[in-house]
Image (spheres, rainbow, N blue to C red):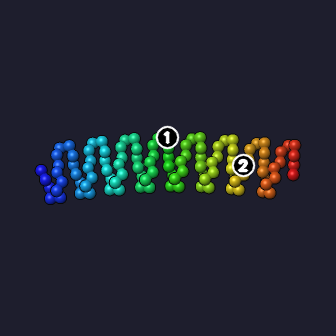
Amino acid sequence: MRYSDGNTSNPSVMRYSDGSTSNASVMRYSDGNTSNASVMRYSDGSTSNALVTRYSDGNTSNASVMRYSDGNTSNASVMRYSDGNTSNASVMRYSDGSTSNALVMK
C-alpha cells in the first residue's frame, strides 16, 4: 500500500512523518537519538548507565574518583588545593612554595 508521501508500509515496518522507522527493539526520538534498555541518552548527548554518571561539565564520577569544578581529582591519599599544590601527611606546602616536615622548617 502506497501513501501520499510515497512511502510504503507493511506489518514489520512503520514510518513516521519525519521519515524515521521504529520497531520493537529501537525507538527513535525527535532529536534523532535512539534509546534501548542498556543505554539512556540525555539532551546534551551524553549517556549514562549504572557504572558511570556524566555531569553537565562532561566529567565523570565513580566511587574511587571525584572530580571538582577546576578539573582536579581527589582521593583518600592526595588532596589538591586551588593553587595546584598537593598535601599529604608527610609534606605540607605553604603559599610561598616552601615545605616543612619534622626535619626541616623554612
Residue farthest along the left direction in this orientation: 1
Horizontally, is 15 left or right of 57 in the view? left
Q: Position of residue 76 (x, y in %)?
A: 66, 41
Say above or below: 40 vs 95.
Answer: above
- Residue at 59%, 46% in the rendered image: 66
Binning the other alpha carbons within 10 Å of mark 1 as few (below 14), some (14 to 19) or many (20 upward) gives: few
- Residue at 78%, 51% in the rendered image: 93
Binning the other alpha carbons within 10 Å of mark 2 as few (below 14), some (14 to 19) or many (20 upward) gives: some
Q: Helix, strand or loop at disc 1?
A: loop
Q: Position of residue 4 (x, y in %)?
A: 15, 59
Horizontally, is 93 left or right of 11 in the view? right
Q: Helix, strand or loop at disc 2?
A: strand
Q: Nearer the viewer, residue 6 or 63?
A: 6
* Dot 2 amino acid type: Thr
- Residue at 59%, 44% in the rendered image: 65
Horizontally, is 12 left or right of 77 in the view? left
Residue 78 sits in quarter: top right
Residue at mark 2:
86
Q: CA distance from mark 1 to mark 2?
A: 28 Å
Horizontally, is 43 left or right of 57 in the view? left
* Dot 1 amino acid type: Leu
- Residue at 41%, 55% in the rendered image: 43
Q: Position of residue 100 (x, y in %)?
A: 83, 48
Q: Position of residue 50 (x, y in %)?
A: 47, 41
Q: Point out which mark residue 51 bears.
A: 1
